[in-house]
Amino acid sequence: MDSALRAIIVFVVLWLLIRLSGRRTLGEVTNFDLVLFLIIGGATQRALTGQDYSLLNAFIIVVTLLMLNVLLSFVETWFPRARPWLNGIPMIIVERGRALRWRMRRSRVTEPEILSAARQLHGLERLDQIKFAILEDDGSISIIPEGGSKQDRAGAQPPEPP
Amino acid sequence: MPHPDALSEQADRRAPIAEDMRFQRRSWLIERVCWTLWLVVVVATLTGLFSHGPLSGSVATAANGLSVGYERFQRETRLVHFTVTVPAPNGNEVAVRLNRAFGEAYNIETVEPQPIRASAGRDTIELAFAPASGQGLVAWIGARPRRWGLFELAVAVAGEAPATFRVLIYP
């Protein structure tokens, strides 16, 4: 009994701690996030297995964790109103070239991070080239450039002469 | 007065996404409360509230001078030490008795110095030592908690009043 109970408690507590630490935690894989990811795994591993290293215990733990994952996805599907609490909500942080600094401060997002996302996703160089930058619920930053997306711009190209 | 831009930043936008800044502000508040609680947890840990520290170390004594150094807050599976001191014992042999709760809560792993005799009855564990003549006994017992909960422990020299104390073992 305690194997499944440990797995449930560790999963719920870990999920809750990461959810409450804010979006930027583990949102992007920086060096710090990688260290955190590795250490959290190491710190919780013994709490999961206790002193039972049998195959059956490992199997029970994995099955319990997978079942919890599936359960969470069902909760999101059946109770859409729970989704913001479970995942958070996206938020605009750059609007028509203007950085919304109060929002950025509260979410601990910096301008260099936004510009980095803009460069990587769309090859943009400056804030005024960004129509919208959105902090997604998973902590990543999505960019809508001025003039539309790459696909929009590609679609707007005049047809090749015959 | 808040900056005009700060006011407009708190308003919901409808495009390209539908926002809910009221929910967002509430989330931020909950996060910040939790961060404060976590800071309290770290400080409490450093002071020994969760084992091994100034708040945790304590000594229990009995009327005959027996004293037991122990940690008030312990954690399941984390090795702890009890220091049993018997000043000027009578005779060549000192029998130290641990109550039933010791057996329930701990696996005793090490005892220094080696007892000359160890036995376990229904309600006690008895460890007999032979200290050097005229000298007091100091024994260190290394035990590993195997259950969590609140336990009332007692250590006595055979036939005399015990030193009793409580420990909280965290899961």
Image (cartoon, coloured by chain):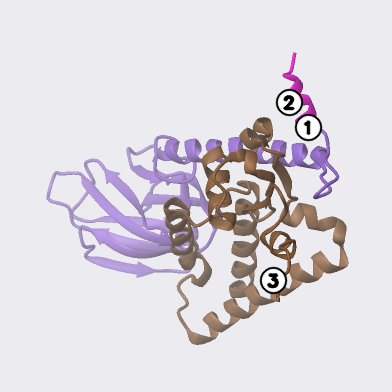
Chain colours: A brown, B purple
In the rendered structure, find residue B6 and report the number of the disc placed on it: 2
The amino acid type of the residue labelled 1 equals Gln
Relative vertical location of residue A131 with respect to residue A62 in this rendering, above or below: above
Q: Secondary structure at mark 3?
A: loop
Residue A63 position, x and y percent, is: 63, 80
Query: Which sits in the foreground, B42 or B27?
Result: B27
- Chain containing mark 1: B
Q: Nearer the viewer, mark 3 or mark 1?
A: 3
Residue extending farthest to the front is: A162
- Chain containing mark 2: B
Mark 1 crowdedness (10 Å alpha carbons): few <14, some 14-19, many ≥20? some
Residue A138 position, x and y percent, is: 65, 56
Residue A49 position, x and y percent, is: 50, 72
**Which residues make up the magenta segment?**
B1-9
Residue B52 position, x and y percent, is: 39, 44
Q: Which residue is under mark 3?
A: A160
The answer to whether dots 3 and 1 both sit on one chain is no
The amino acid type of the residue labelled 3 equals Glu
Q: Which residue is under mark 1?
A: B10
